[in-house]
Structures are given as structure tokens and as C-alpha cells.
Amino acid sequence: MRVAWLIVLASALVACGAHASDPGPATAGPGSLGMQRHAGYLCLPLTTHRHFVVGWEVLTNRADTPVTITSVDVARADGLRVSGSRIVEVNTGPGPGSLVGTWAGLHPRFSPPTRRLMNLSRPAVGSQIDARESVNLVLFLATTQDGGRSGPAEVTYTDDDGVDHSWKGGSSMVLKAGPTC
């Protein structure tokens, strides 16, 4: 009787575990882009803008072959959506302007270094990240009147062998109605 009970219990645990940890579309794990550690969250107050350009995440291809980005989104979005995404090679030289940073507005007035980076950027989906290349992921976000929130950025990509992988950023986002967070 004890053996039968253990078999039923083990079967239930396996069934529950498989359901609870279902990640959605099957991927082969993080692959050559690795995974980011949780870095905290970004809170932006909504006063006049409902659109933001956010570019603080960096993806580094550690492989000797390129990877191709197939989708970009954010996890657990509520009142927030990704309206576009771009990548730009991270400036490895001296001086400011390595990352795009965070800007308010649908068409913000970028600083000269950021404008230069945006002019060098390309659409993320369909782009390759070359071997040993680091790129800044830039998200164009839109939110509702009341604001929104999401988990980190999520990127699905295909390696040189045609295997799908997923990458998750390190920061969650809150866009809150009002003058402060």
C-alpha cells in the first residue's frame, strides 16, 4: 500500500511540476546571450508623456557564430506594450554615449551622442548579433493613461544551428501616473 501511495504522490508531483513550470513556447534555454541577473526596476512618472524610449539592457553574443533576433517583448505586461525595438552596437571606445538610456516622448529630442546612436541603430527583430558583439537593446514603450508595469525585456533568438533560445533582461518597469514614483 505504501508503494502505491508513493507512486500516486510522485505522479501528482511530476504532473503539477510540469504544469507550473511551463515556460510557453519551447526554447533550448539562454544560449550564447546568457541571462541577466535581476538589477531592480525602473520607475518613470507619467506627467505629459505616454511613450518612452528605454535603452539600458545590453545583449552580448558569447558564441563564435552570429545569432538572429526573432522577437522582442516584455514579461507580464499590464497597461504597457512594446511598440517597437531596435539594437545598436555598444560603443567600446572612450567617451560618453555607450547606451541610449531613457527618454520621454514618442519622438524625443535626443542628446547629440544618443541621436548618433539612434542613427546607427537597426530594427531588432530580424537583425543578427555577430560573434562576440555587444548591442544595446532599445524598446519603444507605450502606456495607458493610468500607467503600466512589466517584468523584464524578453528576446527570442535563433543560433547558427537554427535552435531557438530566449534571453531575459535584468530590470522590471513601472510607468506611474503622476509627478513622482
Image (tube, rainbow, N blue to C red):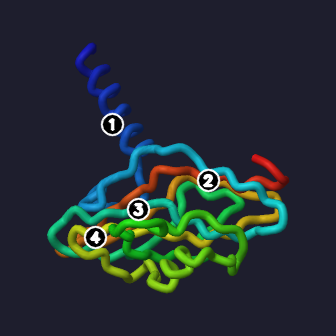
Q: Amino acid at mark 4?
A: Glu
How far across and down, in percent of the image, does residue 38 sit?
Answer: 46, 44
Q: Residues within 10 Å of mark 3 (few under 14, many from 20)?
A: many
How far across and down, in percent of the image, does residue 112 sit?
Answer: 57, 78
At 41% from the left edge and 62% from the top edge, which residue is drawn? 58
Disc ID at residue 14: 1
Q: Residues within 10 Å of mark 1 (few under 14, many from 20)?
A: few
Residue closest to the far front: 95
At mark 1, the secondary structure is helix
- Mark 3 / mark 2, whichever is N-terminal: 3
Quadrant location of residue 141? bottom right
At mark 4, the secondary structure is loop
Q: Amino acid at mark 3?
A: Val
The one of 130 and 166 positioned closer to us in this rendering: 130
In this figure, which residue is indicated by the disc labeled 3? Answer: 58
- Mark 1 / mark 3, whichever is N-terminal: 1
Q: On the rendered image, what quadrant is the N terminus found in?
A: top left
- Mark 3 / mark 4, whichever is N-terminal: 3
Distance of mark 4 from mark 2, alpha carbons? 26 Å
At mark 2, the secondary structure is strand
At 78% from the left edge and 68% from the top edge, which residue is drawn? 49
